[in-house]
Image (cartoon, rainbow, N blue to C red):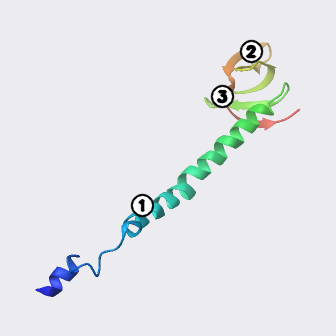
Amino acid sequence: MNFLAYALGGGGGEGSSGGFGAFLPLILMFGIFYFLLIRPQQKKSKAHKELLSALKKGDRVISSGGLHGLVTGITDDVVTMEVAPKVRVKVSRGSISGVTGRS
């Protein structure tokens, strides 16, 4: 019966760990989440911000809705794209998902 008490952790204090030992699994889980989820998302966000800041007139872009066009005008938060000859569309600058070609 003593074996069962030791296996369940009630064995007189020998098997019980201190305060740091209880938090070690949580620290390890946070480290795993940081390197597998948080850090890659931060890198992707940083790269997207750099892409938007480098955007200039004459770039061929694609929006997050799948609209391809040529940048004809840029303001702080709006991009004017020409999707066909003499057809211009204004989209939010944040909705530009990529640059397909630069002029």
Q: Amino acid at mark 1?
A: Leu
- Lower sequence index among marks 1 and 3: 1
Q: Amino acid at mark 2?
A: Arg
Q: Quadrant of residue 82?
A: top right
Judged from the image, the secondary structure of the residue bearing numbered disc 1 is helix
Q: Which mark is drawn over residue 94?
A: 3
Callout in the foreground (3, 2): 3
| Residue 16 spot, x, y in % from top left | 30, 75
Q: Quadrant of residue 11?
A: bottom left
- In 3D space, how far apart are the residues under numbered discs 1 and 2 (Cα atoms)? 53 Å
Up/down of 31 relative to 45, above or below:
below
**Residue under the point 69% across and 42% down:** 46
* Quarter of the image where the C terminus is located: top right
Q: Quadrant of residue 21?
A: bottom left
- In 3D space, how far apart are the residues under numbered discs 1 and 3 (Cα atoms)? 36 Å
**Residue under the point 54% across and 55% down:** 34
Is 2 situated left or right of 76 in this image? left
Categorize mark 3 by other alpha carbons within 10 Å: few (<14), some (14-19), many (20+): some
| Residue 72 spot, x, y in % from top left | 81, 19
Q: Amino acid at mark 3?
A: Gly
Q: Which mark is drawn over residue 88?
A: 2
